[in-house]
Image: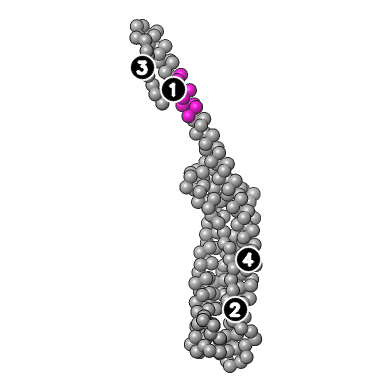
Amino acid sequence: MDIHAPHQPVHTWRDFFTHIAVITIGLFIALMLEAGVEWLHHRHLLHQAEANLRTEITDNRSQLVFDLRQIDGIEHELAANIDTLNAVKTHQPPAQTLAFHWAWNGMESAAWDTARDTGALALMPYDRVQSYASIYGQQATVGEQFTVFMHDFYRSSAPARDGRKPADLQPAELDAMIANSQLALADLKYLRDLSDSLGRIYAHQSANI
């Protein structure tokens, strides 16, 4: 914004105040235009952020339904693995072979991260930000618990890697697999509880967003 001195010399107080008025009006118009542009920018930023957040949360709710179905299958396999390992340990014929399968998509947070980094969250009503924060906070907790589960899940399968059969395992290895499988199963149950809680948060907070 440039402010220039008057081109004509000021001879009277009337000329002086006329120039002051012109400058003041010019500054006012420039500031109003700048504020208008900024308001339009903030409005666009807010609407884009909220649209992205709603789309991402909708997609995440669908992913949660998928992930909960995967928990059912993983839980069944882990329980069957424990039965198989106990049978081998007691020299009984196992009912089935060991299985270590898993699938998990997890939830995204790109829209939330972008809204935070661009300052869009500061433009939202406080209660709406709280609703989003509750959802994404629980999503992060679910993701962290899945990481804990995967750590113990892979530990439970370690002795049986490279194609080793349960009958080839030493007693200490069988004990370790049973213990780690039980731990992974407990991790999975907690993951289910957290995921169920996330589903309830989705349902409860949907009215606020």
**Along the viewing direction, whichever of 100 and 131 lies nearer the viewer:** 100
Magenta region: which residues? 25-34
Read off the residue under disc 2: 99
Q: Is residue 77 above or below residue 6?
A: below
Q: Is residue 19 above or below residue 67?
A: above
- Secondary structure beneath dot 4 equals helix
Residue 180 seen by the camera = no
Query: Compared with residue 119, is residue 181 higher up or lower down, i.e. above or below?
Result: below
Residue at the (59%, 52%) spot, across then down = 56
Distance between mark 4 and mark 3 Cα atoms: 72 Å
Looking at the image, is mark 3 or mark 1 earlier in the sequence?
Answer: 3
Query: What residue is shown at x 53% (from left), y 57% (from top)?
Result: 137
Q: Which residue is mark 4?
A: 68
Label 1 Cα neighbours within 10 Å, binned few <14 / some 14-19 / many ≥20? some
Contact flag, marks 2 and 4 (Cβ < 8 Å): no
Cα gap from disc 3 to disc 1, whole angstroms = 14 Å
Question: What residue sits right under mark 1 in the picture?
Answer: 27
Task: Estimate the spatial distance between the alpha carbons at disc 2 and disc 3, rounded to whole Å.
Answer: 84 Å
**The magenta stretch spans residue 26:** yes
Q: Residues within 10 Å of mark 2 (few under 14, many from 20)?
A: few
Q: CA distance from mark 1 to mark 2?
A: 74 Å
